[in-house]
Image (cartoon, helix red, strand yellow):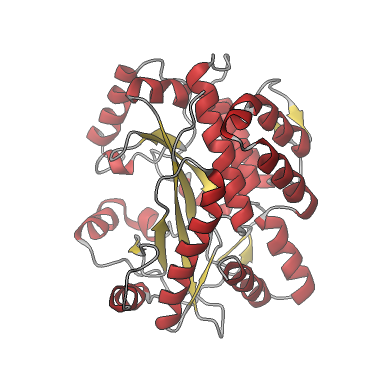
Amino acid sequence: METRKVGVEEELMLVDPATGMLTAVAGHALRAHEERPGEQEAPVEAELFLQQIESQTPPTDDVTDVAGQLAASRRAMGEAARSAGAAAVATGTAVLVDADTRVTPKPRYRRIVEEYGELARTSLACAMHVHVDVADEDEGLRVLDGIAPWLPVLLAVSANSPYARGRDTGYASWRYQTWSRWPTHGTQEGFGDLASYGAVTERLVEWGAGLDDGMVYFDARLSQDYPTVEIRVADVCADVEDAVLVTALARALVATEADGDRIRGWRGDLLRAASWRASRFGLADRLVSPTGLCLVPARAAVESLVDHVRPALEAAGDLALAEDQVERLLARGNGAMQQRRAYESSGSLAGVVDDAVRRTEASWR
């Protein structure tokens, strides 16, 4: 079983460090990053809204490298934000908002808002995307069909968005619900072959559900630009350690499903329900077992994922890392649980933002 290269994209919110409110200073932050003397350790780029920025790591075949790479990219985003008088924070949704979102002044982004209106204007969210190498698109398609039942477990692990726009949403990942309004979003039932995948994505664009293939927002898709499967289901993680765990599990899933038989019997509506449950509860309640089609404790669901991909984790040298990080995650909780504890201790959503800023900055120092 070959060791596949991985790369990670992360999006961070920009907030006023004094108030915790969103602040639309991405343009200033990007200019400050570009003007910084010397070679930059990581890229910082624009996203749909001026209240967020993103970065990505270079491809690597060693998951232990990802921790340092993510620290470097978070540092680059954090320093760019600081130059603009803001703080960069790893939360899946905007906790506090006192103004409407502002769209980044790029033609593509403006067209998205023109075409999709309020749906686009209210879709501010920050995710984590993991790219994993595949041999070709046929292998990538086999992977997409195989990993679908396991993606809700990855969502539960990463869930980091319980608060949005000044309210407790009642969800562990409100980001996932925010994006579920897009007509191309979600975990898809099996396509069967590459021709079917191509036909579906072509019709989605033809029918106006997306401007182009870049707006096919499946929870996992074939990358437009690289020979990779792009796993898009995760919230941006509160801690780098959680992001590394998601990366290791995502790569192991791709390797496992490229060589194996996918789980049979999953309908699209059941996949959506499993994803909804992961979004609703994260690790705080039972999840759907991908092998048993029944509800099991969250610990059992996460451990079954590790067992499912164990040979791939062993082959890549990631098993000890994954097992250690799973135990750590289950002991302290995911990002959503940490945000709720911050609210309990501070009594305010401003305290939640302060804690999230502190943890984000600690992850790159």
Q: Nearer the viewer, residue 84 or 202?
A: 84
For this view, does 13 lie left or right of residue 207? right
Q: Nearer the viewer, residue 83 or 346?
A: 83
Residue 221: quarter of image: top left
User: From this viewpoint, is residue 175 visible?
Assistant: no
**Residue found at the far left of this picture:** 107
How many marks are shown on the rendered structure?
A: 0
Residue 185: quarter of image: top left
For this view, does 111 lie left or right of residue 280? left
Residue 303: quarter of image: top right
Residue 242 drawn at (x, y percent): 63, 51
Point 47% across, 79% down: residue? 86
Residue 222 drawn at (x, y percent): 36, 33
For this view, does 34 lie left or right of residue 169? left
Q: Is 147 rendered above or below residue 230?
A: above
Q: Nearer the viewer, residue 320 or 179?
A: 320
Residue 62 drawn at (x, y percent): 51, 43
Q: Is 163 rendered above or below residue 180?
A: below
Q: Nearer the viewer, residue 203 or 335?
A: 335
Residue 140 drawn at (x, y percent): 39, 26
Q: Is 265 rendered above or below residue 34?
A: above
User: From this viewpoint, is residue 108 visible?
Assistant: yes
Point 45% across, 76% down: residue? 79
Point 64% across, 58% down: residue? 162
Point 77% across, 33% down: residue? 300
